[in-house]
Amino acid sequence: MLSLLLCASAWAAIPADTVPQEGTLQEVEIIARQVEANTLRLQTLNFGGVGQVGGSIEGLVRSLAGVAGSDELSSQYSVRGGNFDENLLIINGFEVYRPQLARSGQQEGLSAINPDFVQFLSFSAGGFDASKGDKLSSVLDVQYRSRNTDALPGQQVRAGLFSGRVFSSALLDHAGPRGMVYQSIAVGARYRSNAPFFRGGDVQGDLRSHAQDVQFLFESASPRWFHEVLGIAQTSTFALRPSSRTTEFGTVTEVLRLNVFMRGMERYQYQNAFLGARSRYTLNETQQFYVESSVAQALEEEDVDVESAYLLGEVNNNLGSDSFGEISYLRGSGGHQRYARNTLWVREWQAKAGYVYKYEDQRLEAAVSYRHQNGLDMVHEWVNLDSAGYSLPHQPTAVVLQGNDTLGTTKDGLRLFQVTDSRGQLVNGKLHAHVLWQRAIPETGWKPGWNAGLRYVRDSRSGEQRLSPRLSMYWSLPSRHGVELSVGSYAQTASVRELRDWSNARFLDSARMQHAWHGIAAVEKRFESNGRPFFWRGEAYIKYLDRAFPFEQDGMRVRYLGEGPGIARVVGIDNRVHSEWLPGTESWASLSLFRAQEKFSDTWTDRGSDYRFSFS
């Protein structure tokens, strides 16, 4: 792939009325730092190029401790034994929608995060504070910036045959000391095709894959007011006319080959748009007020009609044979037909108001918000399986005598191997409120820093109300050690996908929210070796779900199998080491060991997301 990189800075020129001055800055002593419960922060320099196959920030997140993923082209990931639906994505304080119907990373398209906008990101694999939304596993908090800096250039173009990005930021107006009064805007556009990755796979055919998005961020600041508007529009289309597929499996001494010949077409299309606005007023050095509102809409469609015939046989592995590598013995044959017409439509709007009070090394935040959800889920799909000329499942037959002919006919109509025909509608209002009290971590002494909060959620669909207390405490010890303890309650209200029961083709209108308890103990240490700085952090955690939904993973798509109710548990250890192998560039290695189990009858079984370990 040929790429072209051009960079320029909109702030490169120095204004003519600027008077250079030289002087010595006064010494500054850092006496405390803010508590961010179990949170890892990464700066822009760590992902400026985003050297991942899918080109997404989430690909970098999958290299962190406790995170696992099975598809490099996808922006989905699993955290500490949870599924893909349990992760919250926040951009500039706004919760952003993720696609739900995509079965693989090839179909998914672009990530919601544009790397060119990112100033820094924070990731928490559990134990996050009460200001974050209602998910069970993790929070990825991304901060966009519209003003260009050393890490965020003014203009940038990356052009290639199958992917590209264009980014531009401009300072519309600025005045006052240190640029405290300004207006700025940043606009970015991207495109990508997954066709190169398809050509190296097992399936052969005609593929058309393209995804595009446009994002913008506007900021306006003054000594008292700060306003920002964030907009995102994305579309993705995946159309495939498959012709054949060849898969080999088995052992060294017994190799089996599955040849599949297909005709038909698969078409997946995803569209979503988001618009959010926030205004913040600074009353004085200690008090702030803010209001925000956002609206999001998504439309996802699946159209599939593919017929296939398959041959399963043993491969000749005799090197001296003239037919080496060919099928020598046919074990079976059959047919398969899949048909689907699925549509998912979601619209959400949200309004929020909050207050922040700061006093010395402490911070108090209180906020209330309301989110209204509308969703329509229409599923119509079936599978017809034919094995050796017999449609499965087998149907009883009746014998009919007609003259000299004897006929065997089915008593009923043709039964399909699998049928799902269902429609569900979600109309829901969620009321949220939280109180958060933070005390900064003293750099010296034994006094702890803390992050204590209480979150309230009311779900109008199920009529549930829940209070979730959360607490994290951190001690900065001598010899550059640190200890952190966290415990908290986390509830996740059901989305349209979680209300779909695939086991019985039902829509669970009255399903209750899932709930989990997190307990985390962490130890960290900073040290130097061979002239390089190192940072090590180890965490032992337990996650207990006293209300969990059973699910299975169909590729990258999560299918829920009813409300349960059931329980689940995850126990594990995370380790990560950070250093700078190259000057100015942070590097790290992560190792995670865990066990995820669930119980919906009388015995504990492994969850569908029980990866056991991850290393990167």
Image (spheres, rainbow, N blue to C red):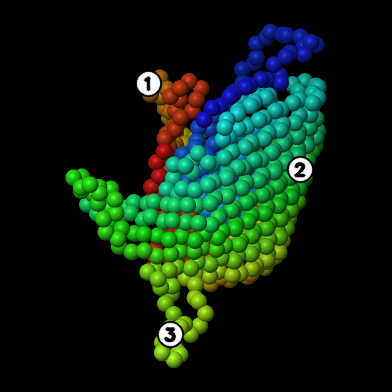
Measured as percent of width and height from the top left, residue 475 is found at: 50, 38
Element type where label 3 sits in the image = strand
**Whether residue 294 is visible:** yes
**Which sits earlier in the primary sequence, circle 1 or circle 2?**
2
| Tag nearer the camera, 3 or 2 | 3
Measured as percent of width and height from the top left, residue 495 is found at: 62, 59
Q: Which mark is residue 457?
A: none
Element type where label 1 sits in the image = loop
**Whether residue 473 is visible:** no
Tell which residue pokes out farthest to the left in this image: 320
Measured as percent of width and height from the top left, residue 486 is found at: 51, 48
Left or right, residue 427 beside residue 582:
right
- Which kind of residue does numbered mark 2 sit on? Ala
Q: Which mark is residue 277?
A: 2
Which residue: 64% across, 54% down? 300
Measured as percent of width and height from the top left, residue 79 is found at: 49, 49
- Which kind of residue does numbered mark 1 sit on? Asn
The answer to whether the residue labelled 3 contacts the one labelled 1, judged by CB atoms less than 8 Å apart, is no
Q: Residue 530 carries which label?
A: 1
Which residue: 37% across, 51% down? 247
Whether 300 is drawn above or below 221: the answer is below
- Which kind of residue does numbered mark 3 sit on? Leu
Left or right, residue 544 beside residue 213:
left
**Neighbourhood count class around disc 2 (C-alpha, 10 Å): few under 14, some 14–19, many 20 upward:** some
Determine the image quadrant of residue 534: top left
